[in-house]
Amino acid sequence: MSPRISELWVYLAASPLLGLTFTLLAYQGALFVNKRCHAHPLANPVLLAVAVVVMALWATGTPYRTYFDGAQFVHFLLGPATVALAIPLYAQLGRLKRMAVPLLVALLAGSITAACSAVLIGRLFGASAATLLSLAPKSVTTPIAMGIAEHLGGLPSLTAVLVILTGILGAVGANGVYALLKIDDPAVRGFALGTASHGIGTARAFQVNEQTGAFSALAMGLNGLLTALLLPWLMPLLLRGLG
């Protein structure tokens, strides 16, 4: 290792910038692999980057809090990135108006189904009440889901993991489901993916085309809002019904 590179490593290792630098490098490497695999769903860049970061933290014994202190700037950028998704959506405004009623019905059905199915499956496997409350918002983008879980009495850290897993599974498996159900409309595909798999699904949708990505972004935002409004009164009823 040359003196200049050695000095850079010593500086990064002693500063919070190490987490940010490693996160960006991991994701850039994952994008490279994704392109070499012709954007295959199994080569999802988020999945690959998360795997690399997790293995690195495990191998070095680095606590997550230490890593997050440096990488939290990426977390901060989630807000502006989400707002910026309104730009491609504006280009689809005409079709959005024509599909307003079907989309609202789909949103309500998807939001309730995502929460209730997660809780029912968790209950079937004997999950605790806190775990069930953490499972409920798993189809909502991470910042909103963690806030909902904390308000309900769940575990925000567990919810964050569940949200990421849900997004990755949706991004990887969506094409197979669409083919099985013979769904070809880009708007329908995007809206379903955004409702079920939030930001990670939306990133995958934009890889397909702009229309799919725009409707996925719309669903992601609306599902976060609707879930935040529904779950505080829906979850007590559901838990009471499950005993």
Image: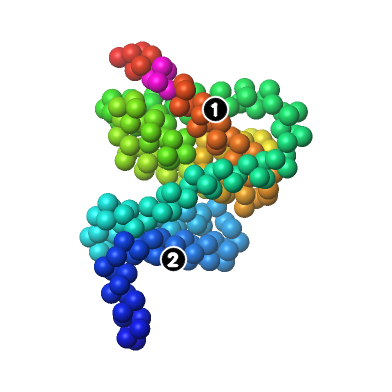
The percent position of residue 99, horizontal first and vertical second, equals: 72, 28
Residue extending farthest to the left is 61
Q: CA distance from mark 2 to mark 1?
A: 35 Å
Q: Report whether residue 212 is seen.
A: no
The secondary structure making up most of the magenta span is helix
Helix, strand or loop for disc 1: helix
Residue 167 against residue 18 in the figure, above or below? above
Q: Nearer the viewer, residue 234 or 185?
A: 234
* Magenta highlight range: 231-235
Give the residue at x 32% y 69%. Answer: 12
Q: Report whether residue 93 is seen.
A: yes
Three-letter code for the amino acid on which mark 1 is drawn? Gly
The percent position of residue 124, horizontal first and vertical second, equals: 34, 25
- Check if mark 2's residue and mark 1's residue have beta carbons within 8 Å: no
140 relative position to 206: left or right:
left
Three-letter code for the amino acid on which mark 2 is drawn? Leu
Q: Quadrant of residue 50?
A: bottom left
**Between marks 2 and 1 in the image, the one whose residue lies nearer the viewer:** 2
| Residue count near mark 1 (Cα–Cα under 10 Å), binned few <14, some 14–19, many ≥20 | some
Give the residue at x 43% y 40%. Answer: 142
Tell me the residue that label 1 is attached to. 110
Disc number for residue 25: 2
Total marks in image = 2
Q: Earlier in the sequence, mark 2 or mark 1?
A: 2
